[in-house]
Image (spheres, rainbow, N blue to C red):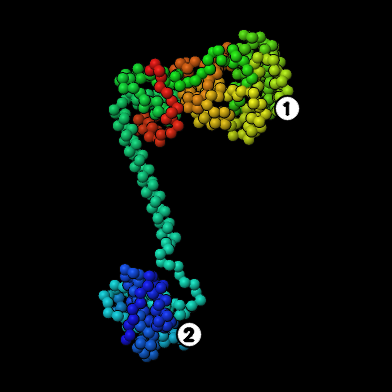
Amino acid sequence: MNVQRFTGKNAREAIAKVRATLGEHAVVLSNRPISSGVEILAIPGTDVPDASAAPTTPSVARAVVTRSKVEPMSTVSFETFVRERQKQQVAAPESEVPVSPQRAAMANAPRAPQQPGRFAAETLAATAAVTTSTVAPSQPEKAPASVASPTAFDANQVLMEELKSMRSMIASQLSSLSWFDTVRRSPVQTQLLRLMLSNGFSPALARHMVNRLPADRSDAEADASQWLKDVISHNLHCIPEQESILNAGGVFALVGPTGVGKTTTTAKIAAGFALKHGAGSVGLITMDTYRMAASDQLRAFGRLLNIPVHTARDAASLADLLELFDKKQLVLIDTVGASQRDQRLAELFAALPAKVTRLMVLNAAAQAETLDEVVQTYGQGPGTRCVITKLDEAVKTGGAVDVVVRRHLRVEGIANGQRVPEDWHSARPQLLAQKALQTRPSSVFTTDDSELGLVMTAPEIAWMNASMTESRHA
C-alpha cells in the first residue's frame, strides 16, 4: 500500500493536493493538525483491496457522509459499523442506482494504525469532503472554517451584554455602599440632601451643593441649613431694582406655555409701571389670536388701567404697532400660549423683531423636568429674563429655583396671586431660597434612606463643575 503524506495551510488546500496527485478517487486515511497547518495521509484508489465481493448500495456511501455528523468513533468500530450496514442492505431493491466501486472502496478502506478515536472525526470529515465532491462537483465549496458562524457571533453578543449588565450592577452596588458610608460619616449632609430633594431640587444640583459643605458647618444642622440658603441665594441672579422693568422700561414679549399666567403678568407689570410713570407711557399688544376671545382678558385689564390694547395678527402688523409705540417707555407683548413641543413656536419666534426682549414666564407649580424643557425651548441662553408665577399654588418651589440656578436665568419678579397689581413682587434671592428650602412633613412622596441612596448614586453631571459658586459670606 503506497501511503503518501500531504500538508497544507488548511484542510481545503491539503485535499486539493490529494486530488491533484492521486486523483478524484483517492482514499484519505487520516488527517491531523500540525504546526504549519493540516497533514493528510492518503492512498490512490487503485491500492484499495477489491471490494466487489461485498454488496454495495447507496446507503453504504451515504453512511460515509452522514457519519461525520455523529459522535467520533475509532477505526475498528467504524469498520464494524460498515459491515453491519452491509448486512442490512443485502436485500435492498435492485431499482436503486448502484454505487461505483471507488466509492464503495472508500467506505471499506483499511485505516492506518492509530490510537482509537484520536483523529476519527477529522478523517470522516475529510473523506466526506472527497466523496461529496465526486458525487456533485457543481456544488459550491463551503466557507473556510476560520469564518465565525452566526450562532457563535450571537453567543458572543449575549456574553458581552451579560458582562456589561454585570459591570453596571457592580458599579451601582459600589456606589450604594459609598453613599451609605457617607451617610454614616456625615449625617448632616444626609439631612441637607433630604431637605433639597423633598422640595423638588434635582439630585445633581443637591449632590453638587452638599458635597461642598465646609467642615466647620458639618456638625450643626442649623448652621448647615443656613449655609445652604446662603449658597442658593448667592447663585440666584435677580434683576437689580434700578434695572427692573418697572423702573427702566423697554420692549418685552412675554412667552411661555399655555396657562402659566402670561396675560395676568402682563397686566401686573403694566399696572405697576403706570402707577409710577403714568398710563400714557405704556403700550399693550396682544398676539393671541388662536384662542376664541383670548384677547378679551387683556382688554378688560386695559380698560381698568385706561390703556388701549392693540392686536397684532402677523409679523407685519406687529412691526407697525412697534413703530407706533416707538415713543412709549414700556411696550408689553402678550404672545400666544403654546406648548414647548408645538411646531408653531418657530412662527412665533420669527414674528418677534430683534429689538424685542423675551420675558419667559415659568409656572412654579409645574414639574421641574417640564420647566427645564420649557427653558431649553423658549430661552435664549444664560442671562434670559424670567418671571416665576403661581408661587401660591406650588407645593414645592425647589424645581423652579433649581432650573433658574442651573440655566443661569435672571429673575425679573415673582407673582403669588391673581390680584393686579398687588400680587407682583420684585425678585429677592433670600426670599426665594427660604421658600425653596421649607421643612415639609412626611408624606407618601418622602423617600427613606434606602430609596434616597438609590437616587443619590446617579452619575455626576459634567456641566456642574464650573457653573456654581459658593457664598461669599458662608
The answer to whether the residues at label 1 and label 2 have Cβ atoms under 8 Å apart is: no
Q: Which mark is residue 316?
A: 1
Quadrant location of residue 277?
Answer: top right
For this orientation, the residue located farthest to the left is 115
Is residue 172 in view from this perspective?
yes
Give the residue at x 33% y 20%: 217
Distance (Cα) linking label 1 and label 2: 93 Å
Residue 180 in percent (x, y) is at 31, 32
Count of numbered tags = 2
Residue 216 in the figure: left or right of residue 142: left
Q: Nearer the viewer, mark 1 or mark 2?
A: 1
Residue 65 in the figure: left or right of residue 338: left
Give the residue at x 67% y 29%: 351
**In the structure shown, which secondary structural element does the residue marked by tag 2 occupy?**
loop
**In the structure shown, which secondary structural element does the residue marked by tag 1 occupy?**
helix
Q: In the rendered image of this protein, does residue 27 appear above or below residue 345?
A: below
Is residue 65 in view from this perspective?
no
Q: Which mark is residue 197?
A: none
Quadrant housing the N terminus: bottom left
Q: In the rendered image of this protein, does residue 199 appear above or below residue 131?
A: above
Give the residue at x 46% y 86%: 98
Residue 207 in percent (x, y) is at 39, 29
Residue 246 in percent (x, y) is at 59, 13
Residue 261 in the figure: left or right of residue 95: right
Q: Residues within 10 Å of mark 1 (few under 14, many from 20)?
A: few
Return the disc, 1 or 2, that comes first in the chain's sequence.
Answer: 2
Q: Amino acid at mark 1?
A: Ala
Q: Amino acid at mark 2?
A: Val
Q: Which mark is residue 97?
A: 2
